[in-house]
Image: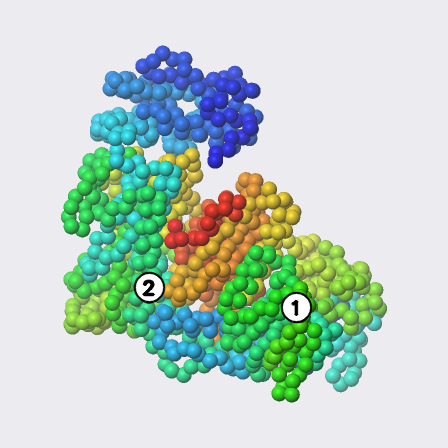
Amino acid sequence: VEQSPPQSPGPGKAGDAPNRRSGHVRGARVLSPPGRRARLSSPGPSSSSEAREELRRRLRGLIERSRVMIFSKSYCPHSTRVKELFSSLGVECNVLELDQVDDGAKVQEVLSEITNQKTVPNVFVNKVHVGGCDQTFQAYQSGLLQKLLQEDSAYDYDLIIVGGGSGGLSCAKEAAILGKKVMVLDFVVPSPQGTSWGLGGTCVNVGCIPKKLMHQAALLGQALCDSRKFGWEYNQQVKHNWETMTKAIQNHISSLNWGYRLSLREKAVAYVNSYGEFVEHHKIKATNKKGQETYYTAAQFVIATGERPRYLGIQGDKEYCITSDDLFSLPYCPGKTLVVGASYVALECAGFLAGFGLDVTVMVRSILLRGFDQEMAEKVGSYMEQHGVKFLRKFIPVMIQQLEKGSPGKLKVLAKSTEGTETIEGVYNTVLLAIGRDSCTRKMGLEKIGVKINEKSGKIPVNDVEQTSVPYVYAVGDVSEGKPELTPVAIQSGKLLARRLFGASLEKCDYINVPTTVFTPLEYGCCGLAEEKAIEVYKKENLEIYHTLFWPLEWTVAGRENNTCYAKIICNKLDHDRVIGFHILGPNAGEVTQGFVAAMKCGLTKQLLDDTIGIHPTCGEVFTTLEITKSSGLDITQKGCG
Amino acid sequence: MAAMAVALRGLGGRFRWRTQAVAGGVRGAARGAAAAQLGRKVAVVDYVEPSPQGTRWGLGGTCVNVGCIPKKLMHQAALLGGLIQDAPHYGWEVAQPVPHDWRKMAEAVQNHVKSLNWGHRVQLQDRKVKYFNIKASFVDEHTVCGVAKGGKEILLSADHIIIATGGRPRYPTHIEGALEYGITSDDIFWLKESPGKTLVVGASYVALECAGFLTGIGLDTTVMIRSIPLRGFDQQMSSMVIEHMASHGTQFLRGCAPSRVRRLPDGHLQVTWEDCTTGKEDTGTFDTVLWAIGRVPDTRSLNLEKAGVDTSPDTQKILVDSREGTSVPHIYAIGDVVEGRPELTPTAIMAGRLLVQRLFGGSSDLMDYDNVPTTVFTPLEYGCVGLSEEEAVARHGQEHVEVYHAHYKPLEFTVAGRDASQCYVKMVCLREPPQLVLGLHFLGPNAGEVTQGFALGIKCGASYAQVMRTVGIHPTCSEEVVKLRISKRSGLDPTVTGCG
């Protein structure tokens, strides 16, 4: 239930407000005589945020109720041109002249929050923000404007979302909650090895979920070793069974797929298991497995098609190599494995495979975990190396040959040095490529409706309200350019997008201080800036970096190595030692990091860390007792105990 | 009992030590080390009075020897037992059930504790803190006296004296057989042999933690609770902690109070108890009876009256002001021995450090006892910071409090087929926007790790709105905190489904 504060009456009661101010809004229809009056700003002495909320709601109302809504200024020649254009098309418009309204400036401000456009004219057609004068004329020339004018309820759906992953589904569910008619098109093109999966996208099927579960399986292997030190007695050599684990994980994923379908059905979202391809403005072709085509139209679209693993483009790669798309449902144990790449996907997969006792080699072209703090990345790598993962640095594969078929078979990999002419050869049962991911944007008819993509990366540039170059088309998740490729980000941006499109919300997705955790055998959690980046942005002399090695209590009795886990914070000396980078390498890094992220959102400083009491004995408490700065050069190794 | 003295040499004055105190445990060490770093002459006097069962230990106080450290390690042993049961679901071919050997665990834990004792000694030495392993008591307001091993009397005097002698478990001495046959947390971690079938009496976190790990390593464990569990903690969370333990094998005798303990001819202990509502008596046989009914401060043997230090007549705890000063200007008290302070190790450490910085470092920073986070290491861990729901309602009124909550399922539980009925998180906020966070309560795996960062957030004055703008880390349990959308007031189902 929407609550109206006592001093700001609802839309229908404006005229009866007891203390209305003298100024009124002049709303004029171009084809009808001026004089219709509407009150836009809140009349009462309520707080400014309430007044703003009220104004925004009324603007939304105007936009929603008008076939064409033009926010204009009476003296502005561009506004006049736009009005004439609609007039010549014989279309009735609702016009609000901001210069004739005493709170026009406020209206303009709120409009710029809604549309990210500060200027007039500001044109909406059938609720879609078209833009200013130039964009309106462009839309007219491209036929989009006529299309927009035609639509109204003529469309099959209010919103069609292409891609049923984290971002798409959250957007769909939220739009449905807000009463819109929504469709989700989701179709998984099988991987070159023929792997395919159900609803839910990368995270659920071939990403975070199975990855974390396999990581947990590997951690359990470690726990089994530890447990003997803690008094648990068993003598047998414990072996790991890949099929048992994979089956259990796939069962869980199937239940999630089913859960997603169920929740779409509950919210009356239409789910179509077909491939979506734009054919003209507002119209998409959906092709199912059998090749049957169906056409759907919608007022607005969201592209959330995500990314798929990249191949090397060398002889034998698509025939014989697998990717993370295949690994988690591989029906047989991969055996001796070469992982190509140094992305977090590469290191995570290598980590858990080694944890099952497999012979694992990682082939790295240049650096580990590009974009992450390099000191941390190297520590992640060296822990893996100490725990049996082999690294081949500065090599790239040039050819993959099959020596033997089988489950697994035998592959010969030929690789060359990135620095010289040296080549090496190796024989593996499985080669897993994890060299990066490509957006799924090139085969969906985007060019037909004019949605621009970055030609190089295939990603879709969007503004800060997730809008593409075509006003009624939005993009969320990994396909959108320059955004963190993370499930919670996609979920958040999808949900907020739906609220902005169909609700009364203005809230934009905040991409600052987005945390993440790499689930390598020793987990790495971080938030904010990498040390390199912090130095680049703030200069070394303005930073103070506090760090320490630590020994988790559980590791002591287990006889695991001291001076391996590491904590580091980067503080900005020019801003009260504000924490701008948070890094932890240790068990449960994800669980530790989350709360600190919330604290960073609230302006965490070193002083506050010092003033906060630790929870004893945990790993997280290490951040409340950081004393040694990197610049001091003091020794951070822990001698013995305590 | 554990006593620790800090003494600082005077500037050729009338005292042999310029500052002198009697204190104990981790706090003493921390404060001593800090003072020494500030260029003072410091002595620490520490002596562990053996428990009634004869258990004794080294330097470091309760936390290191008979508290947090051995407790968390035995908790970890129990958690590993759970993980061994998970392992086959994840493909590890380990034959079940796997037996547990108490002796092996206890020895490993005790060795670690001993290495910590040694570490503390070395640390004091490194910082030139004089260490006396004597039982000290006050002679006058500037002097303490103790007897060393050889019977030699040692007199120490100082300008400043800090008391940090902590507390020891309480025995219900009115119960027949309690002292003779019962043990406490002072003994449990140092037992050479498995305690066997155990009755834990009490509802404190010590009682529940001990019962939790004993059950977890496969022992038949019963907890006898007279009234409410985890007094002072959020009661909804507390009852869920109990619910979880009960569904994982710990037996509970609620509303019962023991009346006597007898040793049977076969060596077993026969405990008789009374049902407090019906008045009916019942008996049971156990191998071990563990009292965990509270702790008493270690002040009686200090001869505080000779120095003129005031204590609370009810609790015997030392009364201090916000600067940790006692009724005698140059005598201070920190840690569990002080009236009205949270009995937590990191609190004591920080209080000690801040005190020394005020005394000798020119600082005026006071200890902030608000929003102290803590975690109860029961089988399902319970982490909390800030106000309980009851306390928030009492302070602000039901109408002004909004509680957001969720039942969630940790990802790791799914494949392992574990029951997640009690995995629950709730955030207590003011209802007025932006909805300041008053308290956070988290029940689930790794609750301590989850809670620490949020404790900082609350310290920073986090609002519900700010926490909701925080991007989650997927897939973790802690992300459930930043995804809390359902308020209790709405009456909607707070069960989390899927990833969204």
Mark seen at residue B275: 1
Q: Are marks 1 and 2 in contact (CB under 8 Å)?
A: no
Please, which chain is the residue tagged with disc 2 on? A
Residue under label 2, please give it.
A249
User: Left of B477 or right of it: where is B228?
Assistant: right
Q: Is residue A299 left or right of residue B231?
A: left
Name the front one of labels 1 and 2: 1
On the rendered image, what quadrant is the N terminus of chain B found in? Answer: bottom right
Q: Residue at x 66, y 66 (%)?
A: B278
Residue at figure coordinates x 51%, y 75% from the top left: B217
Secondary structure state at the residue bearing disc 2: helix
Q: Position of residue A324 (x, y in %)?
A: 28, 60
Q: Which mark is residue A15?
A: none
- Tell me if mark 1 has few (under 14), some (14-19) or many (20+) residues whose alpha carbon lies within 10 angstroms of its own: some
Amino acid type, label 1: Asp
Residue type marked 2: Ile
Q: Are marks 1 and 2 on the same chain?
A: no
Q: Position of residue A473 (x, y in %)?
A: 29, 37
